[in-house]
Amino acid sequence: MSQLERLLLMAEDELTEYSTDARKIEKLRRKIGISVPRKEQQEIKAILLEEVPQGGLSKIVEEQRQTVALPFWGIAGLGLLLGISMFQPLDFLATFGGGYAAFRIQKWGWRLQAKRLLLNTLEEIDQRIANP
């Protein structure tokens, strides 16, 4: 597992906790400071700057992943309802397709949010080094 993947898993772990972004960054900053050398931090930051979206659909999914996935959950529910009530097995395809699409959108948004948290943490580390 690469260092970037390990740090992204740490960021995703921090996202699961209910706390402010500042607290998440503070906890992640301590973990990164202990486990990742400064040179690797800079390399990871450069990679993240290229990967993190600046606009478009990716930015919307990052900020509002549940809202974007909601119509697909609705399609999945409607397909399930129609498949059961009208005894039409083809409607179950809408259930599986909508559920899969909604799940993938939410997973994509979660990953983008973890990248943003990791990038913000690395930028804060740079600021603290520049201005102690």
Image (spheres, rainbow, N blue to C red):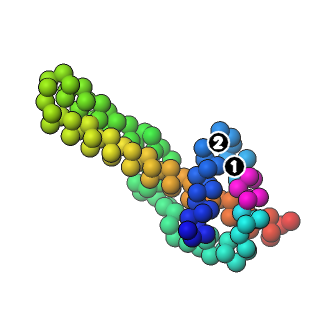
Q: Please state which of residues 113 and 99 is positioned toward the viewer in this rendering.
A: 99
* Label 1 with label 2: CB-CB less than 8 Å: yes
Quadrant where the N terminus sits is bottom right
Quadrant where the C terminus sits is bottom right
Residue 70, position as x, y percentages in the image: 38, 37
Furthest toward the front, the residue is 1
Furthest toward the bottom, the residue is 39
- Under mark 2, the amino acid is Glu
Residue where numbered disc 1 is placed:
24
Question: Is 132 situated left or right of 74 in this image?
Answer: right
Q: Main secondary structure of the magenta part?
A: helix
Question: Is 70 situated left or right of 83 in this image?
Answer: right
- Under mark 1, the amino acid is Lys
Magenta-highlighted residues: 26-31
Residue 9, position as x, y percentages in the image: 58, 57
Badge 2 marks a residue whose secondary structure is loop
For the question of whether residue 82 can be seen, the reply is yes
Image-quadrant location for residue 46: bottom right
For mark 1, does the 10 Å Cα neighbourhood hold few (<14), some (14 to 19), or many (20 or more) residues?
Answer: many
Whether residue 127 appears in magenta in the rendering, the answer is no
